[in-house]
Image (spheres, grey):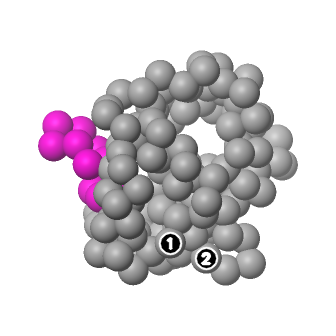
């Protein structure tokens, strides 16, 4: 398991609940616990590989819920998910060195799965083709366990 260095104050359960209610979301339990405990962080180690072995990258940082000076979950959800750049069941949760996003599935058959979205290679970043989205792990905890 990686060492997690928080970048913001921990959240209360009510903070997460208000965010979920505001946007009509439900976070997977593993990610919810992580967000409450760390609310944005930098992991060590930070490297990951997708399940198909085609992407080897790293987590620069996990997004905090709110951050007036930097990208945060609220910004990512409103600017990327709600703008239709990715499916409405996906939430960007982290960023890599090329500013590609690590996303978590909030609903459907793959609820809780974490994937790498190679945003920079999308021919039209305003519509997600899934061609540049690769699964990293089946759950958030499995994703953290894969960091090397």
Q: Which mark is residue 7?
A: none
Above or below: residue 83 compared with residue 112: below
Residue 9 visible somewhere in the drawing: yes
Classed neighbour count for the residue bearing mark 1: other residues with Cα under 10 Å, few (<14), some (14–19), many (≥20): some
Drawn side of residue 147 relative to residue 64, left or right: right
Coordinates of residue 76 in the picture (x, y in percent): 34, 57
Above or below: residue 24 compared with residue 134: below
Circle nearer the N terminus (1, 2):
1
Q: Which mark is residue 26?
A: 1
Front residue of this view, candidates 113 and 29: 29
Q: Residue at x 72, y 71 (%)?
A: 110
Front residue of this view, candidates 144 and 50: 144
Query: Which stretch appears magenta?
Result: 66-77
Drawn side of residue 10 relative to residue 147, left or right: left
Coordinates of residue 59 in the picture (x, y in percent): 55, 32
Above or below: residue 94 compared with residue 110: above
Q: Residue at x 47, y 39 (%)?
A: 37
The residue most toward the right is 52
Above or below: residue 8 compared with residue 89: above
Q: Which mark is residue 107?
A: 2
Drawn side of residue 135 relative to residue 28, left or right: right
Quadrant where the image shows the N terminus = top right
Residue 70 is covered by the magenta coloring: yes
Residue 71 is covered by the magenta coloring: yes
Q: Are marks 1 and 2 in contact (CB under 8 Å)?
A: yes
Badge 2 marks a residue whose secondary structure is loop
Quadrant where the image shows the C terminus = top right
Q: Residue at x 71, y 45 (%)?
A: 141
Classed neighbour count for the residue bearing mark 2: other residues with Cα under 10 Å, few (<14), some (14–19), many (≥20): some
Kindly report the distance in space between the C-alpha atoms of the residues bearing marks 1 and 2: 8 Å
Q: In which quarter of the view is residue 112 placed?
A: bottom right
Coordinates of residue 77 in the picture (x, y in percent): 36, 63
């Amino acid at each position: 398991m990686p060492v997690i260095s928080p970048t913001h104050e921990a959240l209360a359960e009510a903070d997460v609940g208000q965010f979920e209610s505001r946007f009509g979301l439900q976070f997977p339990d593993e990610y919810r616990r992580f967000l409450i405990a760390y609310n944005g962080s930098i992991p060590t180690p930070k490297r990951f590989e997708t399940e198909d072995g085609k992407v080897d990258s790293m987590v620069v940082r996990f997004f905090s819920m709110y951050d007036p000076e930097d990208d945060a979950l609220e910004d990512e959800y409103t600017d990327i998910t709600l703008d239709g750049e990715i499916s409405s069941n996906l939430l960007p949760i982290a960023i890599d060195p090329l500013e590609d996003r690590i996303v978590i599935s909030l609903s459907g058959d793959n609820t809780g799965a974490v994937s790498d979205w190679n945003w920079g290679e999308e021919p039209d970043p305003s519509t997600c083709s899934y061609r540049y989205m690769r699964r990293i792990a089946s759950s958030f905890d499995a994703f953290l366990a894969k960091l090397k």
